[in-house]
Image (tube, rainbow, N blue to C red):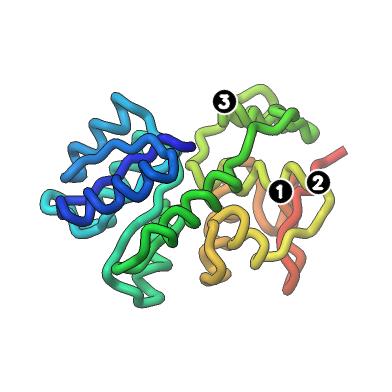
Amino acid sequence: MARVLIVEDDPLVRSAMVADLTQRAHAVRTAGTALDGIREVSQHPPEIIVLDLGLPDLDGRSALKMMRAVTETPVIVATARDEETEIILLLNAGADDYLVKPFSGEHLAARIAALLRRSGPPSAATVIRAAGLLIDLARREVLLDGTLLELSRREFDLLAYLAARPGVVVSRQELLTEVWRQSYGEDQTIDVHVSWLRRKLGETAARPRYLRTVRGVGVMLDPPP
């Protein structure tokens, strides 16, 4: 059972999803516009959000950005477009998964179950230490030599994933799958985020301190002694 928020303006589609998910023991709330959805997120925090991209008040990516500004809750976007470029843009903008309309209730329920498994119960280890880095997973905070770093959601997730595997080279494909939650994409996306993260860690590719790139293989966190 999960708390699911459906943001969908078509009352017939919305009713069908509510009926199916309720039958599967989920607690479902709904909104017909992006702004009402954001209000629901603030007042009744869900565990999963199903966000239709054809809303009357905001376009899909704008609605997704506003959702991401107020919550880290996994978002499944529902779209009528299945072009690869559009899907990549949505995933990079913060979506955790997507469904192409029309889709069945069984398909939606399976995607929700998969996201719930990914998020899973909190790990017993909630703090990772690596030399001068302290990563608090529960509070989503990173301290570098005692100074709090301002990281984006994706930068934090990338650093935490690498820090949990110190000294291990993680492939770009694994980062796309486990951090970006997508099965395909461009290496440039990862390279850009690694570059931003290096800047905040006070290092460069030529003079790495924590992040080392192994050409043609991937990236690893190799903390200084």
Distance CA(mark 3)–CA(mark 1): 18 Å
The correct choice, above or below, for 151 with respect to 14 in the image is above
The correct choice, above or below, for 173 with respect to 161 in the image is below
Query: For the C terminus, which image quadrant?
Result: top right
Kindly state the secondary structure of the residue where label 1 is placed. Answer: helix
User: From this viewpoint, which residue is outermost toward the bottom?
Assistant: 83
Instruction: Answer with mark 3 or mark 2, whichever residue precedes in sequence.
Output: 3
Circle 2 is placed at which residue position? 166
Does the residue at mark 3 contact the one at mark 1 (Cβ under 8 Å)? no
Kindly state the secondary structure of the residue where label 2 is placed. Answer: loop
Residue at 63% over, 31% down: 137
Circle 1 is placed at which residue position? 162
Q: Where's residue 122, x and y in %?
A: 65, 32
Q: Where's residue 46, x and y in %?
A: 39, 34
Circle 3 is placed at which residue position? 139
Q: Where's residue 119, x and y in %?
A: 58, 42
Residue at 25% over, 58% down: 53
Does the residue at mark 2 contact the one at mark 1 (Cβ under 8 Å)? yes
Kindly state the secondary structure of the residue where label 3 is placed. Answer: loop
Q: Where's residue 23, x and y in %?
A: 38, 44
Please state which of residues 35 and 214 is positioned toward the viewer in this rendering.
35
User: From this viewpoint, which residue is outermost toward the right?
Assistant: 225
